[in-house]
């Protein structure tokens, strides 16, 4: 056993780190900008990503034949961790880079690859992920958005929810039902939708943090060319699904990096603030809570490193990724709770409200962390997966 | 980057598991620990012949020369099989003796298949309010040792005991005594986990030859952390086995015309238990690695491993009992045997509050 990086992995990290030092300006850092969702920061974010793309720092995981760096899995983890560590905002290109790109390479037509891959890699085009619907969340295959062939065009009607960047996106990766008579998993296709097409309406959903990042998107008779189907017709479920496991997989490691940084903030706060005449970091139950939270974040990382080892050995975990989601949520929600316990009454205001501690960062983390048991497959679904597919318990 | 057993370690693990599945089935554990006097010399002999009892002794002294990652593997399997013999104690004693440069006792472990237990202050403190270290007075032949220890696992069921003592110089010392020698007294105390009986130790002018002791404060220093990690590993092994037994039961036991494991309420219990057991293993590997490397943060890693297995382990055990229904509450059902070992390991050498503070001291 060892937890060391190889010389070439260290070199890769140093190279990217240096690039970020040179190119990431303070106005973009997630710790300084409370809300990056609106157009003010949008242009700056896009500019930053185009610079990344031009210098070859987007799609490092993509194979060289498609213009990527062919990075190993460990290098991909290093890349994501460095991004988080640097304070860079979440990439607006991530749906294109991590979802659409790999699918295009696997099942896209020659023409589709030619048209879409390079703009993703250069950070020139933004993709929106249109999967979830108001009535199809955990049961995604129950989705109701329909695409009906009319001559040489598909006509799409329906509603999507929980995706981001819809207002700015150039393209949408949209799951739609193309065979209403087939069993629910077999009548879905993966459609490529130009997001500026007539009939598309985008609105924002205000989250409990007060921020607005997530969209509702309405498709009202949107017409797209017949060839804008990615992968085989009616096989969209299979095409999309290989990526959902990936989302829960070792790529939760960068979240651990983000939580470590937030934990350090909490530790510093506890060391330099007093309540009821006593330094916070000297109160036994606060010390215990800080230690507990530290351990949860470290364990999220270590459990992930064990699965990562299995990946690297060519025996990738399958359903085991569900464990990671359980640890992830535990670590994040624990941090959110601890933040408010430390901050006390002065921290209860949300970002943008009147006087509030750390500009609302503590309350924001608490509120934001409430989403972690839900997104990327709810905690309940993960437990069912563990019980049925790992432990082999019978389905009800 | 590798946080997993390598191929050789995997073979080592399956070798020991195979041996214990044959030689240490639960019926045997019950027969010797609960119905008998706790002794099982045939099993110890088998372990010795397999090289396991001397595995912590360096190869240059005819031992197995295994490192601490391997010691953790032994502990995992000792938990899985609910081994009722002082194997991890003997491993730990060998490591401490090696650090202290005490060759004669190592030879007894390597050549005579001696079993050993440990009497250290850190564990005594879990059993007595304010224990003091026994004192070792220098004599012409070596030392004369007097005093008490508490909570010593296996006690006279082991052949030797490594005793932490205070030397006249004020230094900490490690002294190797025979558990049946003159002046050594054992009083058994209650222990719900009968597979690891507990004893108070009294030492009255016990003579220890010079080659069987050392002033070795540093040598002991490592031992509590190492013990914590091996207890954590043992708990992980016990939890993994208990969970397997429970999942099997949930698949077979039918109520309302279907297996109880088809109910989501039961699934959630078992899924959370499985998530805890998986996490424990990462914590154990991490701590074993840090100790093997002698890393500066090994103490924290050991506390984390203990913490990850302490109350989470007890919770897994509780779920195992619960899912077995009323049967799980009976003496006859084996889950309770594991639950008692797991609970005991939780309490000793630092339960949650203590380990949280150990972690806190390194980060605050």
Image (cartoon, rainbow, N blue to C red):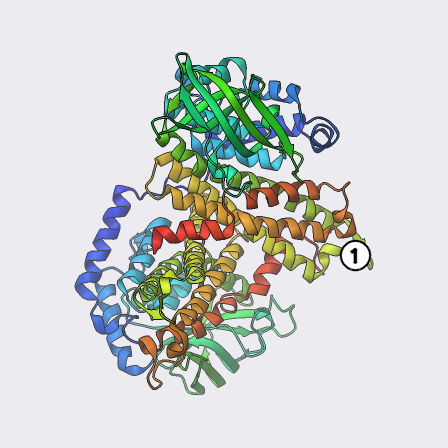
Front residue of B345/B120: it is: B120
Above or below, B82 against A51 in this view is above
* Residue B1 appears in the picture as rendered: no
Above or below, B108 against A26 in this view is above
Location of residue A338 by image quarter: bottom left
Front residue of B158/A182: it is: B158
Above or below, B363 against B146 in this view is below
- Tag 1, which chain? B
Residue count near mark 1 (Cα–Cα under 10 Å), binned few <14, some 14–19, many ≥20: some
Residue at x 34% of width, y 62% of height = A267
Question: Looking at the rendering, in which quadrant would you find the N terminus of chain B?
Answer: top left
Residue at x 37% of width, y 21% of height = B101
Total marks shown come to 1
Front residue of A330/B99: it is: B99
Please indicate whether residue B218 sits to the left or right of residue B123 in the image.
Answer: left
Return the x and y of residue B70 as percentages of the image width and height.
Answer: 47, 31
Residue found at the far left of this picture? A22
Location of residue B27 by image quarter: top right
Return the x and y of residue A14 as percentages of the image width and height.
Answer: 22, 52
Residue at x 32% of width, y 53% of height = A78
Return the x and y of residue A22 as percentages of the image width and height.
Answer: 17, 63
Residue at x 38% of width, y 77% of height = A347
Front residue of A109/A16: it is: A16
Q: Which residue is mark 1?
A: B258
Q: Could you tell me which secondary element the residue under label 1 belongs to?
A: strand
Question: Looking at the rendering, in which quadrant would you find the C terminus of chain B?
Answer: bottom left
Return the x and y of residue B267 as percentages of the image width and height.
Answer: 66, 57
């Amino acid at each position: 056993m060892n937890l060391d990086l190889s010389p070439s992995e260290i070199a890769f990290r140093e190279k990217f780190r240096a690039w970020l030092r040179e190119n990431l300006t303070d106005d973009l850092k997630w710790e300084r900008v409370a809300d990056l969702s609106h157009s003010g920061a949008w242009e700056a974010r896009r500019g930053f990503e185009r610079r990344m793309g031009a210098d070859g720092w987007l799609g490092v995981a993509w194979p060289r034949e498609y213009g990527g760096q062919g990075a190993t899995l460990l290098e991909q983890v290093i890349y994501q961790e460095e991004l988080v560590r640097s304070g860079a905002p979440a990439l607006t290109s991530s749906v294109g880079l991590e979802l659409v790109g790999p699918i295009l390479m696997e099942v896209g037509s020659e023409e589709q690859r030619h048209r879409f891959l390079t703009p993703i890699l250069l950070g020139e085009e933004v993709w929106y992920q249109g999967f979830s619907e108001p009535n199809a969340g955990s049961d995604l295959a129950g989705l109701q958005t329909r695409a009906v062939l009319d001559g040489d065009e598909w006509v799409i009607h329906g509603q999507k929810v929980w995706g981001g960047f819809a207002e700015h996106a150039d393209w949408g990766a949209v799951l739609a039902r193309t065979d209403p008579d087939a069993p629910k998993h077999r009548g879905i296709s993966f459609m490529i939708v130009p997001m500026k097409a007539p009939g598309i309406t985008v609105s924002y959903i205000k989250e409990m943090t007060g921020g607005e990042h997530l969209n509702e998107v309405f498709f009202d008779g949107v017409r797209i060319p017949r060839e804008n189907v990615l992968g085989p017709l009616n096989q969209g479920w299979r095409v999309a699904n290989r990526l959902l496991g990936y989302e829960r997989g070792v790529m939760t490691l960068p979240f651990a990096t983000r939580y470590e940084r937030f934990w350090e903030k909490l530790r510093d706060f506890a060391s330099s603030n007093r309540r009821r005449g006593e330094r916070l970091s000297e109160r036994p139950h606060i010390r215990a809570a800080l230690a507990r939270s530290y351990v949860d974040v470290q364990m999220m990382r270590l459990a992930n490193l064990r699965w990562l080892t299995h990946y690297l050995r060519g025996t990738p975990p399958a359903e085991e990724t569900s464990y990671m989601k359980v640890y992830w949520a535990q670590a994040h929600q624990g941090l959110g709770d601890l933040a408010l316990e430390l901050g006390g009454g002065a921290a209860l205001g949300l970002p943008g409200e009147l006087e509030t501690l750390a500009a609302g960062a503590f309350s924001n983390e608490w509120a934001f962390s409430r989403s972690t048991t839900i997104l990327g497959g709810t905690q309940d679904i993960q437990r069912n997966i563990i019980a049925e597919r790992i432990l082999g318990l019978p389905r009800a | 980057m590798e946080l997993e057993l390598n191929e050789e370690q995997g073979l080592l693990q399956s070798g020991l598991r195979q041996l214990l599945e044959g030689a240490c089935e639960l019926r045997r554990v019950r027969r010797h620990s609960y119905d008998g006097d706790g002794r099982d010399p045939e099993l110890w002999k088998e372990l010795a012949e397999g090289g396991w009892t001397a595995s912590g002794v360096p190869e240059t002294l005819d031992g197995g020369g295994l490192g601490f990652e391997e010691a953790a593997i032994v502990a995992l399997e000792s938990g899985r099989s609910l081994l009722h013999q002082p194997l991890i104690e003997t491993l730990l004693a060998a490591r401490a003796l090696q650090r202290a440069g005490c060759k004669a006792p190592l030879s007894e472990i390597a050549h005579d298949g001696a079993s050993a237990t440990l009497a250290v202050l850190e564990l005594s403190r879990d059993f007595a309010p304010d224990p003091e270290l026994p004192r070792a007075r220098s004599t012409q032949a070596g030392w004369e040792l007097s005093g008490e220890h508490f909570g010593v696992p296996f006690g006279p069921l082991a052949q030797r005991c490594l005793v932490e003592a205070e030397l006249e110089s004020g230094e900490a010392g490690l002294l190797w005594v025979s558990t049946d020698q003159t002046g050594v007294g054992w009083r058994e105390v209650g222990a719900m986990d009968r597979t690891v009986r507990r004893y108070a130790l009294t030492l009255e002018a016990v003579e220890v030859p010079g080659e069987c002791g050392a002033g070795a404060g540093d040598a002991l220093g490592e031992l509590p952390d190492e013990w914590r990690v091996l207890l954590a590993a043992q708990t992980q092994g016990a939890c993994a086995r208990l969970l397997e037994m429970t999942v099997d039961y949930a698949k077979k036991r039918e109520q309302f015309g279907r297996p109880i494991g088809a109910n989501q309420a039961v699934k959630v219990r078992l899924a959370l238990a499985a998530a805890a057991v998986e996490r424990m293993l990462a914590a154990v590997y991490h701590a074993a690695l840090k100790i093997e490397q002698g890393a500066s943060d090994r103490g924290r890693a050991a506390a984390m491993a203990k913490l990850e297995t302490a109350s989470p382990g007890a919770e897994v055990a509780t779920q195992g009992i619960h899912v077995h229904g009323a049967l799980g509450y009976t003496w006859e059902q084996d889950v309770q045997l594991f639950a008692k070992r797991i609970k005991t390991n939780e309490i000793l050498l630092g339960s949650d509050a203590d380990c949280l503070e150990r972690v806190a001291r390194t980060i605050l």
